[in-house]
Amino acid sequence: MRKIKITQVKSGIDRPERQKLTLKALGLKKLNASKEVEATPQILGMVNKVSHLVKVEEVA
C-alpha cells in the first residue's frame, strides 16, 4: 500500500469540533506537524474532510 505524508498547515482553532477530532485522529497535534500514514480509503476520507487545513504529499 502506498504512503502519504500529511502536514497540518492551518490551525484547528475556531473550527467545528468534528474537524478538530479528525485532525487528532490523523495524529496531528500542532501546526506544521507531519505524519506518514498508509493511504487507506478511511485515511483519504479523513484527509478530504480537513483538506483546507492540511497539505498532502506522496512518499516514494
Image (spheres, grey):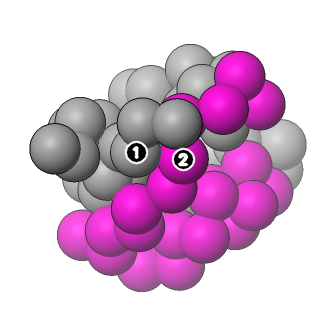
The local crowd at label 2, few if under 14, some if 14 to 19, many if 20 or more residues have their Cα within 10 Å, is: some
Of the pair 12 and 1, the residue shown nearer to us: 1
Of the pair 18 and 4, the residue shown nearer to us: 4
The local crowd at label 1, few if under 14, some if 14 to 19, many if 20 or more residues have their Cα within 10 Å, is: some
- Look at the image and give the residue range highlighted in magenta: 21-42
Is residue 60 on the magenta stretch?
no
Q: Residue furthest left?
A: 60
Left/right placement of residue 14 relative to residue 19 reads: left
Task: Work out which quarter of the rendered image holds the C terminus and state it.
Answer: top left
Q: Is residue 43 above or below residue 32?
A: above
Q: Residue at x 24, y 70 (%)?
A: 32
Give the quadrant of residue 8. bottom left
Q: Secondary structure at mark 1?
A: strand
Q: Secondary structure at mark 2?
A: strand
Is residue 31 among what the camera can see?
no
- Mark carried by residue 41: none
Left/right placement of residue 37 relative to residue 49 reads: left
- Residue 38 in the image: state x and y as whole percent: 54, 47
Distance Cα–Cα, label 2 vs label 1: 4 Å
- Residue 43 in the image: state x and y as whole percent: 66, 37
Marks 2/1 in contact by CB < 8 Å: the verdict is: yes
Q: Type of residue at label 2? A: Glu
Of the pair 38 and 45, the residue shown nearer to us: 38
- Residue 6 in the image: state x and y as whole percent: 36, 51
Is residue 30 among what the camera can see?
yes
- Residue 50 in the image: state x and y as whole percent: 55, 33
Q: Earlier in the sequence, mark 2 or mark 1?
A: 1
The residue to which callout 2 is attached is 38
- Mark carried by residue 3: 1
Q: Is residue 22 above or below residue 2?
A: below
Q: Residue at x 73, y 49 (%)?
A: 22
Q: Type of residue at label 1? A: Lys
